[in-house]
Image (cartoon, coloured by chain):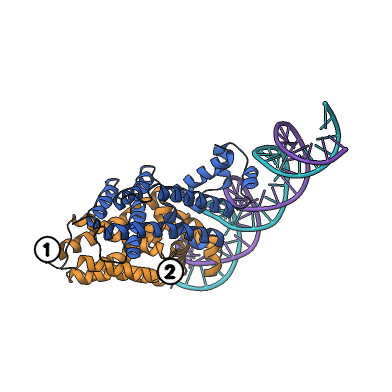
Chain colours: A orange, B blue, C purple, D cyan
DNA sequence: ATTTGCCTATCAAGTAGTAGGTATGTATGT
DNA sequence: ACATACATACCTACTACTTGATAGGCAAAT
């Protein structure tokens, strides 16, 4: 892994463990083993690093979506949940949840990138929810977009909340959402 | 309102608009019209201010709970929603959502206080959900605590997410949760 | 020979927090 | 009534440190 990739990787971890305004170039430099000025070489401003982190998430999500194209909506739903499984295992929160709190302090470019990511996520989930309902696999009354928003927000919140309650609450909420969607 | 109250009020607003690590004593001092040293007089460390903010929320919530003691679970549910209505109107996020992101950067005292607040909230909501179900007003299959966790996390998330999507999504999610609980 | 990827050294601004001073109460003992 | 003593609520001035960011150098790879 190149230093550039290492920086993004570590910044992403710190972002989702501590928040955007709680990690510095110094923190990253220390762990990667270079100087802060070298990070500025790769990412002139912190916003550039922020955009790079989100871009990596967009690419990752696009890859996941592409891998599951044409597959069963149930499999796609499981793939969606697996994202949060991984987050939860590593005690991270999701990108959107992390940046939403600090949203008003972010540079416009970062805000726009984040919207791009959440739109992509929302579009994907809406899509397989709708297909799944048409195929008689899922059951819900709302518009697909609304239901997608609800499912996403639920997962977004629970990875945050379990920091305050109990680890097992995560599995419980996940199971409840799944059961409700599939309940017929 | 005393300067002390003004400080807490303003810090609370900034906390929920920008996040814990994005406001400083200087920011508060400028707006309240005193010097940072005077804020340190009232709150020696930022953690003390953090604890004071959460304490104010605990007191406010206790008052709300007490006001609705013995009232219909439906009224209590509406009271719960009204908390988030107000947040949403002012473009704030909820206290727990705001601090959950930065949770790992917080002093242990602040972390414990926040847990105290979320426990209180969870206990209240669990209570009126259970009562409401016993009275045949609500319908849900999960344990009351689990359902409470789900309802709370849903509202927590949506006030964050609407910063990225559309204002009207808030009302939509609120209506959907209500409809589902009352759906018989 | 130029680009790449790092370095040293430095900056201005901002961070929480401290030391010590001052004016204004507000009790209390004589 | 009056001095003593202490508390309140602010101030100026400062420290030690962190923040993101810049300028300029240097060695290795292309």
Give the percent coordinates (x, y) of residue A151.
Answer: 27, 61
Q: Position of residue B60 (x, y in %)?
A: 46, 48
**In which chain is the residue bearing label 2?**
A
Furthest residue in direction left, as rendered = A135
User: How busy is the neighbourhood of tag 2: few (under 14 within 10 Å), some, or many (20 plus)?
Assistant: some
Disc 1 crowd rating (10 Å Cα; few below 14, some 14-19, many 20+) is few
Query: Regarding mark 2 in the picture, which secondary structure is present there?
Result: loop
Quarter of the picture containing the N terminus of chain A is: bottom left
Task: Compare marks 2 and 1 and give the one earlier in the sequence.
Answer: 2
Viewed as shown, does residue A92 lie left or right of B137? Answer: right
Q: Nearer the viewer, residue B86 or C21?
A: B86
Q: Chain of mark 1?
A: A
Q: Quadrant of residue A132?
A: bottom left
Which residue is at a point 39% across and 57% down the rendered structure image? B124
Quarter placement of the C terminus of chain A: bottom left
Q: Position of residue C16 (x, y in %)?
A: 60, 53
Find disc 2 in the rendering and name its residue. Answer: A91
Of residue C30 and residue B22, the one placed in the foreground of this image is C30
Q: Quadrant of residue A168?
A: bottom left
Q: Residue at x 27, y 70 (%)?
A: A79
Secondary element at tag 1? helix
2 and 1 marks on the same chain:
yes
Residue C18 in the image: state x and y as whole percent: 71, 52
Numbered badge on residue B6: none
Q: Is residue A156 visible?
A: no
**Who is closer to the viewer here, C8 or A45?**
A45
* Residue beneath the point at 31% across and 61% down: B130
Mark 2 and mark 1: span between their CA atoms?
A: 36 Å
- Residue highlighted by disc 1: A134
């Amino acid at each position: 892994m190149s230093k550039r990739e290492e920086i993004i990787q570590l910044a992403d971890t710190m972002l989702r463990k501590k928040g955007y305004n709680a990690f510095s170039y110094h923190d990253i430099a220390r762990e990667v083993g270079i100087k802060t000025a070298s990070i500025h070489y790769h990412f002139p401003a912190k916003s550039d690093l922020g955009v790079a982190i989100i871009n990596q998430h967009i690419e990752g999500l696009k890859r996941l979506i592409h891998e599951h194209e044409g597959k069963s909506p149930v499999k796609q739903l499981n793939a969606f949940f697996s994202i949060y499984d991984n987050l939860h295992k590593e005690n991270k929160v999701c990108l959107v949840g992390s940046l939403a709190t600090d949203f008003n302090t972010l540079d416009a470019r970062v805000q726009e990138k984040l919207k791009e990511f959440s739109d992509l996520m929302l579009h994907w989930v809406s899509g397989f929810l709708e297909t799944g309902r048409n195929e008689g696999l899922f059951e819900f009354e709302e518009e697909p977009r609304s239901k997608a928003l609800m499912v996403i927000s639920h997962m977004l919140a629970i990875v945050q909340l379990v920091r305050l309650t109990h680890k097992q609450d995560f599995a419980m909420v996940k199971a409840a959402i799944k059961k409700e969607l599939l309940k017929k």
